[in-house]
Image (cartoon, grey):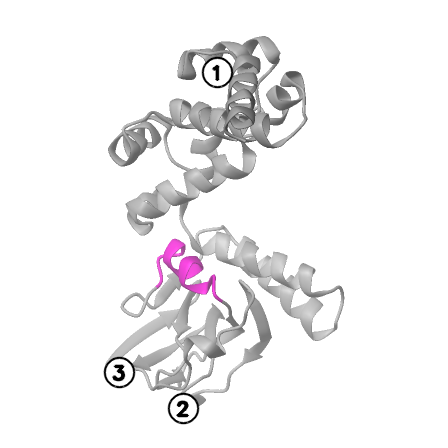
Amino acid sequence: MKPLPVQDNNNIPGRPLVLYHCGHEQCKPSHSFGPAIRPHYLIHFVLHGQGTYHVNGSVYHVGEGEGFLIHPGVTTLYCADDQNPWEYCWIGFDGYDVPNLLKVSGLSHTSLILKDYSNGMLWKDLSSLILAFTERQGNELLYLSLLYRCFSHICRPEQAPSGIVYENYITRAVDYIHNNYTYDIRVADIAKFLCIDRTYLYKLFINATSLSPQKYLIQYRIKIARQLLLESDLSVSEIAYSCGFRDASSFNKHFKNHLQITPLKYRNSILANRETIQ
């Protein structure tokens, strides 16, 4: 059965993640909800007991330490067991970053069951979230920080390479470089941020850019430095530190290796050409 068109892109919140509601319930035997559709995403996490989740003609048996995902616009039904009814908590959420969060967590339209790989930390953060949200203790930033933590517990680190597509690793690595080039970052820092091996990161960059991560980082720093040399009045030393080089000497060395000219001569030659043209 295809999802009903109750939600389109124009209705998705203009924020990466929004928490709508959350709660906790000890269900009575055979208690059920549905069949019904929801306007946003829902995750139910089972603390104790068991039950069944019905969606798209399939029936999932869900027990303690597991949960299930409900997509917006999809008809679902879920029922507590008649002998050992489940106790669960739930979170309702949406936002334009949700598809990526679900992908990282290994969830999709065909993978709807989640497990707690955090040794109890998921329930701890979920209960903190529910308490803070229902009692209005804190603000939206606190709620979202706890919600992101909950997603982090769903994703098992050693399974991340199979759950995240190749292009997403490159995109995230490049984004990390573009936002952190001004600091003293190393290739090991990028690999650690992505939770992957440094050797694997090297292979990804070679395949995608024909450059090693280190060379890509240096080239990007040089690119920014060239812009600053031509578009600002910053000194060579200021530009060196602004682009993540340890000192002006290191900056000069890398700049000359790439462009066969020192930063100062590059600036002067370009500016002189501009004046000649004018």
Q: Which residues are magenta?
A: 96-107
Q: Nearer the viewer, mark 2 or mark 3?
A: 3
State the image coordinates of residue 145 (x, y, percent, origin top left). Answer: 62, 56
Badge 3 element: loop
State the image coordinates of residue 205 (x, y, percent, origin top left). Answer: 32, 32
Badge 1 element: helix
The kind of residue on which mark 3 rests is Lys
Quadrant of res 184? top right
Q: Residue at x 30, y 33 (%)?
A: 209
Q: Residues within 10 Å of mark 2 (few under 14, many from 20)?
A: few
Q: Which residue is mark 2?
A: 34
Q: Quadrant of the C terminus?
A: top right
Q: Residues within 10 Å of mark 3 (few under 14, many from 20)?
A: few
Q: Nearer the viewer, mark 3 or mark 1?
A: 1
In the image, taking residue 208 as reference, residue 227 lies left or right, namely: right
- 104 or 53, which lies in front? 104
Q: Residue at x 32, y 27 (%)?
A: 202
Q: How many marks?
A: 3
Residues at discs 2 and 1 in contact (Cβ within 8 Å): no
Q: Is residue 97 magenta?
A: yes
Gap between marks 2 and 3, in whole Å?
A: 17 Å
Gap between marks 3 and 1, in whole Å?
A: 56 Å
Residues at discs 2 and 3 in contact (Cβ within 8 Å): no
Q: Which mark is residue 56?
A: none
State the image coordinates of residue 158 (x, y, percent, origin top left). Answer: 36, 42
Q: Which residue is mark 1?
A: 255
Q: Which residue is mark 3?
A: 2
